[in-house]
Amino acid sequence: MEPGLNSLLQWGIENSDAGRNPDQPAREPRGLTADVLRSLMGGPSDADLMREAMAIIGSSDPEVTHDAKMTAFDNLEQLVENIDNANNMEPLGLWTPLLAQLESHSADLRRMAAWCIGTAVQNNIKAQERLLALNGIDRLVQVSLDDADKSVRRKAVYALSSGIRNYQPAMNEAVKRLPKDIVGPDQ
């Protein structure tokens, strides 16, 4: 039996009055989870949606338009707002292609990549560790300082600040990479 259907069956049993001993107090009904509802409706999982979005973003197929890539980035950014989805980026192999988009020829794609990175690592130590391990701090510093597009630089600063906030190893790496006039002479 599929795990989603098993969860639905369990939910149905827990929330029905049939077979309940009248002497026992009634339990608070439990709601259906998003995954169970998706399973019922036959929709793809968040992991599938994230993989699909990254496949569109990284596609070199001329049939995949710039607008389609922007929509895919918007979808990915919304998905990684959920900390569980952000933590799934590593096992799904999405960090490397996402970081590669910081070097896209399109300023829009570079900006969206920085935005997704910033959202994924915000208040998320596991994602911050992964960003640091993949040399993402250095890449974000470079984009923050050198990108020709102002909106890209701004999103890179957002991603950088999210990546180093409350995570000292990333802060140390950023201090090493940033110019001395930004971090101060005592660093």
Image: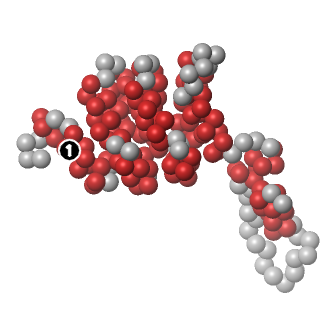
Q: Position of residue 36 (x, y in %)?
A: 75, 53
Residue 74 visible (yes or no): no
The residue under label 1 is which amino acid type? Val
- Front-most of residues 9 and 46: 46
* Residue for point 30% across, 49% down: 170
- Front-most of residues 130 and 168: 130
Q: In which quarter of the image is residue 9?
A: bottom right
| Residue 121 horizontal side relative to residue 77, left or right | left
Q: In which quarter of the image is residue 138?
A: top left
Q: In this view, does 52 lie above or below 22?
A: above
Q: Is residue 158 above or below residue 85?
A: above
Q: Provide the secondary structure element on which disc 1 rests.
A: helix
Q: Position of residue 146 (x, y in %)?
A: 27, 25
Q: Where is residue 87 in the image (x, y as percent from the top left)?
A: 51, 51
| Residue 90 horizontal side relative to residue 72, left or right | left
Would you name the residue on which mark 1 appears?
Answer: 175
| Residue 178 horizontal side relative to residue 54, left or right | left
Residue 44 visible (yes or no): yes
Q: Quadrant of residue 29?
A: bottom right
Q: Is residue 3 above or below residue 177?
A: below
* Residue for point 41% across, 50% down: 130
